[in-house]
Amino acid sequence: MTELKKKQLFGTNGVRGIVGEAMNPELAMNIGLSLSKMRKGTLAVGMDTRTSGPALINALKAGILSGGCNVVDLGVLPTPALQYLVRKYFDGGAVVTASHNPPEYNGIKLIDTDGTEMDDDNTIALEEILFSGDFDVKDWRETGEERHSPEMLTEYIDAIAGYFPETGKELIVAVDPGSGPACRTTPQILSKMGCRVHTINGKTDGTFPGRLPEPSPEGLRGLSELTVATGASFGVAHDGDADRAVFVDDKGEYVEENEEFALMQRLICKEKGPGVVVTPVSTSKIAEEIASEEDCRVVYTKVGSIYVARKMLELTQSGENVLFGGEGNGGLIFPGHQHCRDGGMTAAAMTYLISSSGKKLSELRSELPPRHMKRGKVYTEDPNAVINNIQVAFKNDNLDLTDGIRVNRDNSWALLRPSGTEPFMRLFVEAKTEEESDKFYDEIINAAEN
């Protein structure tokens, strides 16, 4: 049987590494050369606020231009802003970002013509060009042309604000862009919607002095304090490239990302259902409970926003009414806007939810079905052996091999899936109570280690 090819350099969301080690200008230039061999025409590029961004984006552009493609440099902007503009105007693109990783990291995400991240097959094809060095370097008469168009960012801002016109009137919102590119978008979007906006970490700074790019509960204490002090309806924070959004409620309490997904899903299913919601196998079972309320159904994918987006497009093309998608990590996809995770759109949608419901975010959270999720790791050099152990131990349960192995029961589930970069498997276990979750967790651990 022919072995399926796998990505080697690129992960679920692009290639990343420590700058000066795994990530360097030579690699960036060669990625540009490889991309220009696959995608002819005009490519858009942009970057987040990291200090290494200018060196890497100029190397990336050198490769693209040398390969004969034209380049439009959109400047510092969120990844979803670049995706929105690529879908409307360009033949593809790339963004220099390491998303939620610490400041010493950087990376490159590749964007296809439809605005989604490049799929696995095309990424593998690009890697084959990259590793072989089979570049198509043009002579002086055929090199590409470059132009800078940072002003195009306003089109993305206006598109989101126009999706929910003036629904933020009389709302106060606290925003923590984390010194990343959302400094240039989310406060402006919410202001255009009529909100009164207060910011923390609101100036672009690639050293991330206020908090790290990953918006963790611990790192958002300042946002929680600002939310309570200003009487804000909620606080919103972004990761390093603003494709995700996470929230604190009106009491300053962190909103777990699966709760966020469920609240947005309930809003959209009520307004636009019945239809389909697409999400990975790692998302809370709340998604199924919310879907059943509105005569909707959930379709599961592998973990990764690219798989969610592609499945949404596939189902839409087959005639399904695809309402909503995303992951239980703050990365939500609103297909009426675009088929990629969009933190700015998510912030705007939360504004609309609070305004239209007339309820506080803390109240809306209290109305969700109770669930308890426990996470852990199983260290192993042989994930296939662990999966086999689970299959044997839980042969009488409903098993799903979409991504690793998921064990489904009536009111609970457990997922074990291999890490793409390290010798362990991620473990998710969810049940209605902490006691049930702990018990199921121990069952999985015992079976995995036998």
Image: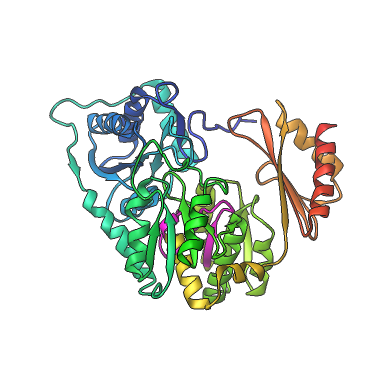
Question: Which residue is at the front of the view, 56 or 124?
Answer: 56
Residue 358 to residue 324: above or below: below
Residue 197 to residue 135: above or below: below
Name of the residue lying farthest toward the left: 141
Residue 253 spot, x, y in % from top left: 59, 58
Which residue occupies 57% across, 58% down? 278
Question: Which residue is at the front of the view, 2 or 309?
Answer: 309
Give the image quarter of residue 375: top right
Which residue occupies 65% across, 44% down? 403
Residue 69 spot, x, y in % from top left: 24, 37
Is 337 covered by the magenta stretch?
Answer: yes
Question: Which residue is at the front of the view, 290 or 299?
Answer: 290
Give the image quarter of residue 54: top left
Residue 392 spot, x, y in % from top left: 85, 40
Q: Which quadrant would the N terminus be assigned to in this image?
A: top right
User: Is residue 313 in sight in this rendering?
Assistant: no
Residue 371 shown left or right of residue 362 in the figure: right
Residue 119 spot, x, y in % from top left: 47, 43
Which residue occupies 70% across, 67% down? 369
Highlighted magenta segment, given as a residue range: 322-344
Question: Which residue is at the front of the view, 339 or 352?
Answer: 352
